[in-house]
Each structure stands twice: as C-alpha cells, then as structure tokens.
C-alpha cells in the first residue's frame, strides 16, 4: 500500500536537548494512524516539523512518495495537509459558512464575496462527508461538537487530503466522541488520510488501524492496533506497566462536610448559570460531577470556593455557613481547591515553583515568621513536594513556572493543594493535560485523600475519570442537577444522556 | 522563546551604552565633537577634567552628581514599588508637591529641637505623599477606576492646592511674595560639601534607608510576596486568598511616601523655604524612567537613579563644551527606548549566543 506521509529518520535538536531522535513515521493512505505519547515525548515537535514550523536537523519527509521540503505552513497547506487544532480557531460572531470560507472566499464578478456559492459548497461538503452543520448559524450559538465539524470542514474546503487531529476529543461528550469516530471512518472512506494525536487509548482502539508510539523523543514502535491491547500500548508509551483502574476500596462515608442548598449563581452574562442546585457530600466519599463544558460547573466551583458572589441559597462547610465568606475564610475552613484554569488562577506564572508552592501558606510558620519570609523552610518544603508528586522542571524549585510544561504545572498545583490535607476538596479537572503516568499518580492521591476522611467534589469533563473515581455521580445540565446516582448502578451511556439533558435520574440510595 | 540567562542588568547596561552612542551620532551629524560627551560625563563622575588635567580633581562635581541623583532614586523607588504590584504611579508630581507642602508646614509652624525637627519634616512629607496616593489606590481597588487618570488629576489638584495652602497658612516672604520665609535653623540636612560649593547633604541617609526598606519589604517579607503576586497575576492572588484590594491601596500609599521623602530632601537641602510651584519639578515623571531602566528592583533603581542623576548633573558641563543640553535629554530618551526594547535586545543576544555556539561546533567538526 502507498504511503501518504513518510517522515524518515527525523532528528530535531534544540539547544541542549534532542526533541526527536531518529523517528520514522509512515502513514498509509486511507487509514487512521494514531500518534501516541506522553507529554514531552516529542509529538508536537514532530507535527510542527510536518507542518513546516520547524526544520528537522536531519531526516527526510515524503508526501505521496515524493520527497518534499516543508519550509513553512503554507507549503504544508499546498501539499494538502490540514490540521484540526485542539483549541478551535473560529470567529465567534461569524456564521459557519463565513468561518469555513475565510481566507479563500469565492468571488463574484464584481469582486465581492459570493455567499450563495460559498453556502452551496459548504452544504455539499457537509452532505458528502456526513458532517452535520447549520451553515447559517453563528459559531457562538452552536455546540462544541458542531464547532469541531466546522473546523474539519474548513480543512476539507481547502482540499486537504491528509488531516491531522490534535487531541480532538478533549472537549466532547461521549455521544459526540462516537459521532467523531464515525466521521473519521467516513473521511477515510472518501479517500482521506487521518493522523490522530491522542493519549486516549480507547479512541485509538476504536478508530485507528496503526499506531506509532513515541517516548522521550524516540520512536518505540509502530503497531497494528487490532492486535495490541490497551495495556500493552500504555506500557509502550510510559515504559512500565500502568494500572488504569485506581484501586478504590468501598467508601465509608461519615458526616456531611459539604452542604450545598438551593444554590443560585449568576454567570458572566448576568443570567443564572447555576440554578437551584443542592448537593451534600460526606467525609470519606468522592462525588463526581459530570457535565458538558459550560453547563455551570465553573460557576459552581467558584461559588463553593468563595470566588464569586452567590445570589441565593447556602453553602455550609462542616455545618458552618460560608455562603458569603471571603476566599481566605474558605481556606481557613479547611478547603482546598484545584482550579479549572491553571494559568489564570492556579499559578502565579512569573513566580518560581517554590513561591507557587506557598501561595496559601506563606503567612504561616515555618514559611514566615513575624512577616518575614523564611526561604530555607520554603526550599525544603518545595524539594519534598516536587519529589513526592514527581514535579519536573529545568532549574528545580527555582524555575519560573511559566517555563514549565503544562503537565508539570498541573502536578505542581495538585501537589500544593493535596498536601494541605484539607477536609473539603473542590477538585476541578485535576488531570487535564497530564499523561498516563501522571494521571495514575493524581487519581491515586485523590482516593488517598478520600480514605483520610476528606469530602471530595470532583468536577471533570472526562467521563472516564468520573466513572473511575466517584462513589456517587451527580450530573449537571444547564445549571441544574439532572441526576444523582450511585456509580455502581449506572452505565456510561446513561450518564451521557443525563449530561445532554435527555434523561433525569435520581437514585434513592444516592440521596442523603 | 528567549532565555532568561541575559539578566536585566546586562540588558540595561547595553541600553545605556546604545543610548550614549545615539548621542554621539547626533553630535557627529551636527558637526560637533562626540568625544565631548565623555569628557563631560567623566568630569561629572570624578571631578577630573580631561581638557585641563593640571587642575586636578574637583570634588564638587561628583558630590553634585550624588545630590541630583537623590530625588530621582526616591521617585524611581516610588514608581517601581507600585509597578511591582501591577500599578502605574504617574501621580509622582502630585505626591511630591503634597510632600513639600507638609514639609514646609511642619518646618514653619511647629517648634522642635534640631534633628528631630528635620526628621519630623521628612516623616510629614512621607505621610502627605502617601495620603495623596491614597485616593487613586482606593478608587482603583474598590471602584476599578484606572489609577493613571486619577493620578494625573491629582497632580494638578496638588499644584493649585499648594498655591492656595501656602499663601493662606504659611508665612510668606515679604520681598518676593513668591515663597515662604526661610526655614528655622532647626530644620536642616547639614552640608557634606567637604569645603566645596556643593549642597550635598545628609539627605543621602534617607535615600539609603529607602533603598534598603524597598528591598527588604519587597523581597523578604510576606507583605512584599503578596504584593508581587498581586502584581503578576491579580486573579491568581485572589484565588490564593490574598487581599488584593488592601494591597493595591497600601502599595500606592507606600509609593507616595517614597516620593514625599524626595520632596522633603529637595526642599530642605536645596531651598530651605516653602515653595509656591508654578509648574512641576518633573522628579515624579523622571521616576518612571528610572524605575523602567532599573528593572523595578531596589538596587537596579539605585543604579539607574545614579545614571539619570549623572545626566542631570552633566548638563552644565555639556553646555560649557558646546553640547546643547537637549542632547542630554536625547540620550536619556534613547536609553529609555532601548530599555523598552529589551525583549529585542535579548533576542539579539540569544542569536549571537547561538551563532557562536554553531561556530564552535564547526570548529570541533
């Protein structure tokens, strides 16, 4: 079979580091080929080379059998290589059609944009590949899944033959993920070639034929997906045996620690983002909150941690009313908070790692005394945390956190928050951007905290994570609680339906 | 991405050198001798005249250099302190005048023994500067009103308030009617002129204390830690539970206090009477440049304050050597531009590094 892309013996050196070391990637035509690797394994570097953003130090690239030199992204586009980015690059106030044609608009004789022709082309493409979109809807009014289809259509409109999907499922619901898998199959049927970058093994199993695994800049091997188990792939990626299912003994819940009663919270737009939301969480249990991104999770987490004003309702920490208390007083009531946005909230990016470790506790002994910082104590503490949570950085604890990789930034936040051993834990997207090994570590730590008696609210967009860790599962849809069930009695499909508002289910056993 | 290995110090030094080179080029283009710049700078720095070497060293020049550096170091600290908290203190002129009013009032209206009287004047000036900076800080913190707008308005309020206050409440000098009577002898910063005509004085002690206080508070205390956190990422520090609003107000007030001290030192050391301002002294605005060049840290500001003081002190030398004093302004401006371009300078340094690295690799091969 012919190869659509061949990257042969690619080596890329950066000052002081070899990011790609003799990597060979051969993608057969009309297949879905997965590229698997941990953070920092060299996936992005390799794709940047394919896209013309970097030049390889050595090695050759062939497209459709012909050797090419991809000097910049325009060359890649001309060669029919298109990329669907993880973070969509769409203009919110434009319509679907306008977004798709942007930069390559069909013209009328007068030189104005021929919207009629553009629309026809979009409709035709969407029919042919089974990509359902509303060509006249504004981006701000359509679902994330549809936005992604718009991104794909953008590439197809530009006659891309080879589509690179960069972590495409990170923002989708389970149903949307299934749809995307179907779309990929359709695309392959229509003669396209797909390169899928992901760290989700399940999706590789479902969609890809071949998979190339990278580890620490080297190519570990290319495998036939149908002959290889998920465990084996994970082992190739991390370099050791990884357990996916965190060992989670039966929960032994105690008193109610977190009591949320009829909570109403306004969102940024001034409308209610959290509506009449009630939930109780007991010591020693993990309650997972599932939901599609943007259904009020962010506002709920902010309201529980004191970061936003509460319209009505109450929040109690261990019986004490903290509804209108300051953020500091929330922490004093023994709460910790792993925030959703690690750059905006979780870290002071221009601070060093060790300074970031003490953002809550710098006022306390031994980190300071009489208002004077005790750097030695902070140094020691930082060394211990980095060690325990495997936080890696170029210059150790003195590294400016801005220069750390996303995964290590996240681990640093988790380390800081978990090490406080709080009674109430508000944990939002704790494993976002982490690789398999780090995910395993963080999940273990969450269960460990539970077993120490913490009440854990786990808010995550990853349904796997919710199903894996939670004792009870709450589902939020459009700001309201649309389900509260025991994890053991529910299927992934049911949760998916509750997330999209198609089902409302409340177990008797799950109610307190 | 650029590396951080080229420190702010190196970048600032390069900016200074480039700025002076720009001055040289301007002089060459206008047909003057560019080397005169160095003759003037060396005279101001060391008191040694290259053109008249037999005259030896005149200490007056270096002392005057230090004298003119004192206020800009203090106003530089002021701007830098606010800047580290994410605030732009462009209200230095107002805080300076407020400080000067308080200083004159305490000097003329209260009787105190020597030394204590002087210290009381300086403290009053610091408090007045802080008070003047309170409103911009408060409005920023609690009403989210841009501090720059309020600061600029406060500058003009100070200017006219000064006129009314001094004429209404302080004894006016009968002959000129444009200033107060002289301060009593109990208010004095002494003279450290070492027999020269320089007015250099014990104000330098306050400057040194201010630099150390700035460094200690900003880098060593929990308060400074939270100020820096607020400055880098106010949402992040809010998440951490820090009191951003309180920090904003306090940071502005401390900044104002530094400027107030500058006013007292100038007023007592150089004038010894209460002034009725008709315009700004510009020390507050100069502080912005000083803070920028000094990288907004204590010792950087000290160094850059000394640099800007040197420029100011060299102006007479420039004129004697036929260099228009505008060239001194021009060099200052060029330095500021080059510092603002520090990202570019870093890029160039990184590029040069990589080139030499490549050459080395070639040599090895």
Image: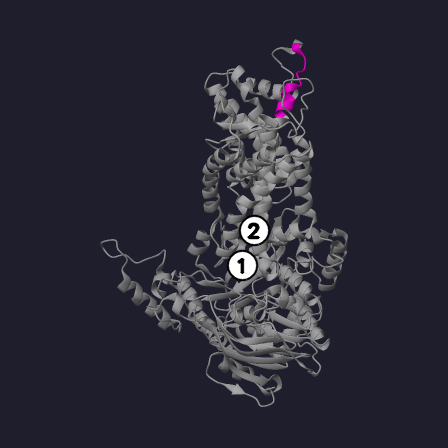
Question: Residue B117 placed where, x, y %?
Answer: 66, 34
Residue lying farthest left? A110
Looking at the rendering, the stretch of residues picked out in magenta corresponds to B55-65
Quadrant, the C terminus of chain B? top right
Residue B341, visible in the rendered structure: no
Discs 2, 1 touching: Cβ within 8 Å = no
Residue ID for mark 1? A6
Q: Is residue B75 magenta?
A: no
Question: x, y (%) of residue A138?
Answer: 36, 66
Name the chain letter of the residue that bears numbered label 1.
A
Q: Residue furthest bottom?
A: A508
Query: Relative to B142, is A135 above or below?
Result: below
How far apart are the alpha carbons under marks 2 and 1? 61 Å
Q: Which of A45/A229 is in front? A: A45
Q: Nearer the viewer, residue A147 or A420?
A: A420
In the rendered structure, find residue B249 and report the number of the disc placed on it.
Answer: 2
Q: Secondary structure at mark 2?
A: helix
């Amino acid at each position: 079979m012919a190869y659509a892309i061949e990257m042969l013996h690619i080596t890329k050196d950066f000052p002081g580091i070899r990011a790609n070391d003799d990597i060979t990637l051969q993608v057969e035509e009309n297949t879905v080929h997965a590229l698997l690797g941990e953070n920092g394994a060299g996936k992005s570097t390799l794709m940047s080379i394919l896209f013309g953003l970097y030049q390889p130090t050595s090695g050759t690239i062939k497209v459709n059998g012909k050797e090419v030199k991809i000097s910049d992204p325009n060359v890649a586009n001309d060669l029919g290589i298109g990329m669907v980015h993880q973070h969509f690059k769409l203009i919110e106030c434009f319509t679907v059609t306008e977004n798709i044609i942007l930069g390559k608009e069909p013209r009328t004789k007068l030189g104005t944009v021929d919207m009629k022709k553009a629309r026809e082309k979009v409709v035709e493409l969407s029919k042919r590949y089974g990509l359902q979109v509303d060509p006249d809807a504004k981006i701000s009014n359509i679902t994330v899944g549809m936005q992604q289809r718009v991104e794909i259509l953008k590439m197809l409109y530009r006659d891309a033959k080879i589509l690179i999907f960069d972590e495409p499922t990170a923002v989708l619901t389970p149903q949307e993920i299934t749809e995307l898998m179907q779309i990929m199959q359709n695309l392959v049927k229509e003669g396209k070639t797909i390169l899928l970058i992901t760290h989700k093994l399940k999706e590789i199993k479902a969609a890809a034929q071949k998979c190339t695994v990278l580890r620490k800049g080297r190519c570990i091997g290319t495998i036939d997906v149908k002959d290889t188990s998920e465990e084996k792939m994970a082992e190739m990626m991390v370099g050791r045996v990884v357990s996916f299912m965190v060992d989670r003994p039966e929960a032994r819940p105690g008193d109610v620690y977190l009591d949320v009663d009829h909570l109403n919270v306004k969102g940024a737009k001034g409308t209610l983002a959290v509506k009449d939301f009630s939930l109780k969480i007991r010591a020693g249990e993990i309650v997972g909150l599932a939901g599609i991104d943007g259904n009020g999770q962010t506002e709920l987490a902010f309201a529980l941690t004191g970061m936003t004003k509460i319209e009505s309702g109450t929040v109690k920490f261990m019986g004490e009313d903290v509804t209108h208390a300051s953020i500091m007083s929330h922490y004093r009531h023994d709460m910790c908070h792993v925030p959703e946005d690690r750059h905006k909230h979780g870290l002071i990016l221009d601070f060093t790692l060790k300074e970031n470790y003490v953002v809550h506790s710098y006022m306390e002994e031994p980190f300071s005394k009489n208002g004077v910082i005790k750097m030695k104590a902070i140094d020691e503490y930082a060394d211990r945390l980095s060690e325990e949570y495997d936080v890696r950085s170029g210059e150790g604890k003195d590294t400016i956190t801005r220069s750390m990789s996303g995964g290590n930034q996240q681990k640093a936040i988790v380390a800081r928050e978990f090490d406080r051993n709080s009674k109430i834990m508000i944990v939002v997207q704790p494993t976002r951007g982490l690789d398999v090994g780090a995910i395993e570590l963080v999940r273990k730590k969450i269960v460990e905290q539970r077993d120490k008696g913490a009440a854990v609210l786990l808010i995550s967009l990853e349904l796997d994570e919710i199903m894996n860790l939670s004792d009870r599962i709450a589902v939020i849809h459009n700001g309201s609680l649309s389900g509260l069930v025991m994890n053991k009695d529910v299927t992934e499909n049911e949760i998916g339906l509750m997330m999209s508002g198609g089902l409302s289910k409340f177990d008797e056993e799950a109610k307190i | 991405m650029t590396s951080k290995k080229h420190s702010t110090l190196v970048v600032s030094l390069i900016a200074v050198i480039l700025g002076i080179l720009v001055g040289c080029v301007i002089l060459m283009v206008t047909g003057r001798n560019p080397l005169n710049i160095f003759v003037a700078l060396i005279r101001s720095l060391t008191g040694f005249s290259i053109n008249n070497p037999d005259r030896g060293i005149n200490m007056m020049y270096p002392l005057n250099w230090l004298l003119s550096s004192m206020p800009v170091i203090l106003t530089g600290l002021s701007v830098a302190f606010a800047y580290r908290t994410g605030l732009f203190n462009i209200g230095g002129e107002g805080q300076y005048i407020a400080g000067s009013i308080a200083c004159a009032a305490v000097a003329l209206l209260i009787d105190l023994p020597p030394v204590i009287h002087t210290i009381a004047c300086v403290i009053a000036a610091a408090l007045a500067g802080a008070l003047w900076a309170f409103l911009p800080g408060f409005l920023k913190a609690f009403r989210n009103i841009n501090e720059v707008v309020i600061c600029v308005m406060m500058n003009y309020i100070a200017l006219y308030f000064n006129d009314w206050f001094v004429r209404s409440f302080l004894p006016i000098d009968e002959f000129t009617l444009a200033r107060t009577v002289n301060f009593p002898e109990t208010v004095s910063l002494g003279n450290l002129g070492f027999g020269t005509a320089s007015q250099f004085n014990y104000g330098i002690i306050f400057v040194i204390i201010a630099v150390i206080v700035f460094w200690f508070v900003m880098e060593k205390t929990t308060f400074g830690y939270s100020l820096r956190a607020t400055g880098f990422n106010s949402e992040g520090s809010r998440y951490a539970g820090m009191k951003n609003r309180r920090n904003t107000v306090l940071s502005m007030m401390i900044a104002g206090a530094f400027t107030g001290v500058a006013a007292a030192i100038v007023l007592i050391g150089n004038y010894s009477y209460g002034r009725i301002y008709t315009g700004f002294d510009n020390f507050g605005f100069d502080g912005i440049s000083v803070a920028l060049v000094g990288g907004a840290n204590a010792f950087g500001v000290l160094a850059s304050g000394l640099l800007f003081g040197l420029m100011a002190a060299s102006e007479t030398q420039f004129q004697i050597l036929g260099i228009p004093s505008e060239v001194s302004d021009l060099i200052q401006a060029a330095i500021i531009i080059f510092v603002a371009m520090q990202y570019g300078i870093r890029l160039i340094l990184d590029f040069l590094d990589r080139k030499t690295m490549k050459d080395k690799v070639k040599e090895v091969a």
